[in-house]
Image (cartoon, coloured by chain):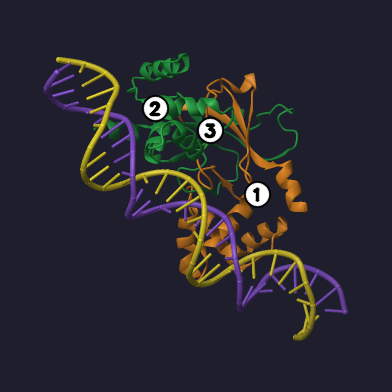
Chain colours: A orange, B green, C purple, D yellow
DNA sequence: TACTATATAAGATTTATTCCTATATGATGT
DNA sequence: ACATCATATAGGAATAAATCTTATATAGTA
């Protein structure tokens, strides 16, 4: 057991998740990219070590790790894109399981000033606050 | 020309977009839902009036209207989901065309307090600021 | 009214994700 | 160490979402 796999195991255990070699490899693969990999790129990376791993395992594991905050995500994919007729300033509460979206308003969020260094070479269309998590209905559904 | 189609036409013209009956119908369909419809639901709605409209037209038109800020979106879909190994507090700059994601940090965004009324019945996994727009590379690519 | 760049329809194709079912395995108690 | 069993996995099929291709049509403009 290398230092790195040991650390991955620890993280999984801390979150009450079973430790499997696949999960350890997936977690290390995500961490290995300094970027924002998609599931397939994680799959290809892990495949080198586990040629028989299935895509389903990768997808399931990534979702699980996201919900346990072991990793993050950027909310692309996973469902059809959702449009929004509301052009007034507002923000979103998003359930990661059922994808329900609730709007909320908060004046103090309406003029967030992004550091100008970040905005070089970029034309913003909008700046919003995303609260991502699990709605109570989904939480309850799992308990049942 | 009803009042509503007139308003939709005006909005399109203001943004320098050609006015076609399909675009007017799509814009009205999005506005008609008080919700966050996906492209297929817009397609089904518009199909009632234009039984021969193609999905491609709906997808193209929605993206166009999003870039011109005629409507918004919630960044689901449109590509594969992207994961993020960085578990420190940070925020994202996202290109709506090429999906490149850049991280940025800003202390003042790290403790945003969402109004508690919005957070009833919801367990947040994370709260972040999204800056969505078009990166310069994509902007330039189009000019060429 | 004619022209031309742009938009559209139709359907095929590609890409992303999830589902299904049989098998395997990690964690737990003995 | 061993049996148990809830949970995880592989493999591949199925579904869903988005995009591409090509021929045709049309909005804006001269």
Instruction: Compute the Cα span from label 3 to label 2.
Output: 28 Å
Subunit ID for the residue under disc 2: B
Quadrant assignment for the C terminus of chain B: top left
Subunit ID for the residue under disc 3: B
Which residue is at a point 39% across and 27% down the rendered structure image?
Answer: B23
- Asked which secondary structure carries label 3, the reply is strand
Which residue is at a point 47% across and 57% down the rendered structure image?
Answer: A40
In the rendered structure, find residue B130 and report the number of the disc placed on it: 3
In the rendered structure, find residue A67 and report the number of the disc placed on it: 1
Work out whether B3 lies above or below B42: above
Front of the two marks 1 and 2:
2
Query: Which label's residue is closer to the chain start, 3 or 2?
Result: 2
Hey, which quadrant is residue A107 in on the image? Answer: top right
| Number of dots carrying numbers | 3
Work out whether B123 lies above or below A22: above
Q: Is residue B59 left or right of residue C20?
A: left
């Amino acid at each position: 057991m290398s230092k790195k796999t040991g650390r991955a195991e620890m993280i999984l255990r801390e979150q009450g998740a079973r430790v499997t070699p696949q999960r350890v490899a997936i977690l290390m693969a995500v961490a290995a990219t300094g970027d924002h990999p998609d599931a397939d790129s994680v799959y290809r990376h892990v495949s080198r070590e586990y040629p028989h791993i299935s895509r389903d395992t990768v997808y399931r594991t990534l979702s699980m790790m996201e919900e346990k905050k072991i990793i993050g995500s950027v909310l692309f994919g996973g469902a059809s894109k959702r449009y929004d007729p509301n052009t007034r300033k507002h923000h979103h509460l998003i359930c990661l399981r059922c994808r329900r979206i609730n709007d909320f308003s908060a004046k103090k969020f309406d003029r967030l000033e992004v550091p100008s260094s970040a905005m070089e070479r970029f034309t913003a269309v909008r700046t919003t606050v995303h609260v991502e998590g699990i709605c109570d209905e989904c939480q309850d559904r799992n308990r049942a």
